[in-house]
Structures are given as C-alpha cells and as structure tokens.
Image (cartoon, rainbow, N blue to C red):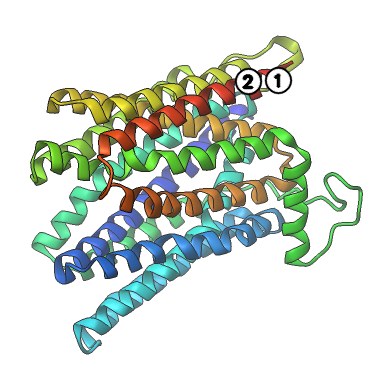
Amino acid sequence: MKENRRQRCLLFLTSQSITLFGSTLTQMAIIWYITAHTGSGAWIGAFTTASYLPQFLISLAGGAWADRWNRKWMIMGADGMIAVLTGAMALAMPRIPGKEMVYAALLFLSALRSLGAGIQVPASGAAMAELAPEEERMRFNGMHALMQSAAQLAAPGAAGIFLSVGSIRGALWADVVTAAMGMGLLWTLRFPASRRAKRGALTGEIKKDSLAGDIKEGMKYVRFHALVGRLLAVYGFFIFFTVPGGFLDQLLVSRRFGDSYGYMAAAEAVGFLGMVLGGGMISLFGGFGSRGNHAAGRTAFGRLQKNLSLGLTGFGILTGALGCAADFPLYLLCMFAYGVCMTAVQTAVTTLLQEKTDPEVCGRVFGLMTAAYSACLPLGMAFFGPLADRVPLPVIMGGSGGALVLLGWRTAGILREEEV
C-alpha cells in the first residue's frame, strides 16, 4: 500500500513539473517579448501586476473549492482552461490588428493564466498532503522542490530558443503541449475523496454551503490554530524580505560586475542549481525519522524545526553576503548556497502546514499560503524596487538579511513552544 502511495505521489509530481515547465517558459517568453518590443516600464509593471494580482484575488476561493471538490479535477480543469486560452491566443495573434492590441491581448491572457494558477496551486498543495505517505512528506516535498527548480532552470533557455529561432506563438504552443502531457499523466491517478467536514472544524457550528462560509471557516481555523497562523505569517515575511536578494540580484550584478547578459544568466542559473541541490538533499536525507511510537507515521518535528529556523538564518546571512561580495566567483558561491537555503525554508514550511492542518481545511490553508506569496512578493517589489534607486543595494540586502536572521530566531522560539 505504501509503495503504491509513493508511486502515485511521484507520478503526480512529474505531471506538475511538466506543466510548470511549460507555464514558466511561456510566462518568461511573454515578459521578454514585451520587454524587447516596448522597452516600457509601464508595460512591464502592468504584466507583473497581471501575473500576481488575479492569483491573489482568487486563491482564497481556490482553497475553499479544493476542500469542497475533487482536487484532481480541479487541477486538470485549471490546467486545461489555461491551455485552451493560451492556444486560442496563439491562433488569434496573426489576426489582431496593431502591436498595442497584441500587447493588450497578452496582458489579458496573463491575467487569466494567473487566475488559473490561483485555483491550481492550493489544490496541488493540498493534494500532496493526501498522496504522500505521512512519514515521508518532507522527502516528497524536497523531491517536488527539486523537480520544480529543474523545470525553472530549463525554462529560461527554452524560452530564449523559441524567441530566437521561432516566435512568441511557438512559446504559447509549448504551454499547450506540456499542459496536455501533464494532464495525461494526472488522468491515470486516483485521488482520495476530499474529506470535507460536515461541521465547523473549531466552533461546532454547521458548516455553510456558501463559498463565503467556507472561506470564513478557513479564516477561523487559522485564527484559532496559532501555529498554522504563525507559519503563514513567517512565510509572508520570508517572501517579502527575499525580494532584494532573489529578485533585485540582477540589478546588483549589472551595477557591480557589468551590464552583461552572461553575468546575469550565470547568477540566475547558479541560484536555480542551488535550489535543485537543496531539493535533492532533502528528498534523500531529510524526509525520514520519527519521534518513536508516540509519533509513528509523522515526520520528525525536530528535523522540520531545524530545517526552517536554520534555513531562515542561513538565508539571511547569505542575503547580506550577496551585497558584500566584490568578486564574481564569490558572488556565485553565495548565490548557490542561497538557493539551497531557499529550498530548505519553502519545503519545511510546506511540510509543517501539511502536518499541522486538519485534512478538511487543508485546501483553504494552502489558499492562504498562495495569497501570502502573491501579495507579499509584489509588495516587496513595490517597496524595495524604488528604494534601490535611492539607497545602495548592499545596504538594502544587509537590512533585509538582518530581518531574515531575526525571523529565523523568532521562528525557532515559536516551534520550541509548539514542541513543548
């Protein structure tokens, strides 16, 4: 039975990695196409907003739907909707008059794709909690991080090939093909039925059938389950403070080492390689261990605690080191370790949420996690981006790194309280 669960989980991860590769390739190709053809900060800002805001707005509803409906069909439905819309755009582009209309149509497509992600991501996170053997969740989440990082590592090169030797339409069709492949694999999987509670998870009140009632129940759950709420808050702060090191790093590279695409591509690739290695290390060594018979079937809480608190602390130190590195090979070494720590933090948070959340509300908790990401990342960009034009980036990275170290220290205290 356990071997069957492992096989199903591995098949699920493979399907999601294939679709992620296509989605990342297409989204990067769209952004690069707009950048190359407009050179406009306003257009780039509009596409960044369209990539995150719709996902934020629908993620709470997506989490509630994931607790109400079959998660397999939700994921396939979201992937299918995105693929159909993307294919329709590829067919329509030659018939759209004027470049401005093409840009507007691609902007609208990005917003619709973001809506699909807001439905798919919470369902996928909750599905992992169902499919992975309980005592091996950390291992499979690490494997998930490895596959995702590998897909994201390969996607920029593939997007560049499509735009160099083909066209933006070819990149759009690539998403359609990868979505069909991922959905084909997912079709063969049998998911457990969603365990939607008949009564409120905390209050004992009869659970409402309305979407608003489901979302309200999820909010109550997070408010009354202190650890879940604190983990979501930690994740939101983590995403906010990753912006200087993780999303403004290209600006630092261009200012310090030269405006060379080679330098920028090397820094990006090495960061993703670190994430791949981090996922591989966790999948091989970080997913086993228990607390004896008292905790049979559960991932060792102490190991998760160390992964998260040490990952946050190391991440903060490396953020500051990126700002100080005057030599490019040293910068790459810091970026590689930075990627390892990022994977450790994200995997530990995901596994802790899967373990500490009741199955009946798991979708809504991951909907809130998706909302935290899609809100805190643009907020971080809006805050640190303009600040980088007035304050030296090394100073900003040092400040955000210090905040992350403090966050790691505070998180360790929170988790020690829970363990006691």
Mark seen at residue 137: none
Q: Vertically, is 368 above or below 402?
A: below
Q: Secondary structure at mark 2?
A: helix
Q: Vertically, is 128 above or below 58?
A: above
Q: Taking 347 as reference, is 336 left or right?
A: left
- x then y, percent, for residue 27: 31, 60
* Dots 1, 2 in contact, CB < 8 A: yes
Amino acid type, callout 2: Gly
Kindly give the residue lying farthest to the front in the view shown.
Answer: 390
Given residues 12 and 332, the one toward you in this image is 332
Residue marked by disc 2: 413
Residue at (26%, 62%) from the top-left corner? 31
Q: Vertically, is 263 above or below 66?
A: above
Within 10 Å of the Cα at label 2, are there few (<14), some (14-19), or many (20+) other Cα atoms? some
Q: Taking 30 as reference, is 372 left or right?
A: right
**Quadrant of residue 341 within the rendered picture:** top left
Given residues 25 and 54, the one toward you in this image is 54
- x then y, percent, for residue 257: 10, 36
**Residue 283 in sight here:** yes
**For the image shown, how many numbered marks are present on the structure?**
2
Residue at (25%, 40%) from the top-left corner? 392
Gap between marks 1 and 2 measured at Cα: 6 Å
- x then y, percent, for residue 311: 45, 24
Residue marked by disc 1: 417
Amino acid type, callout 1: Glu
Q: Secondary structure at mark 1?
A: helix
Q: Taking 26 as reference, is 132 left or right?
A: right
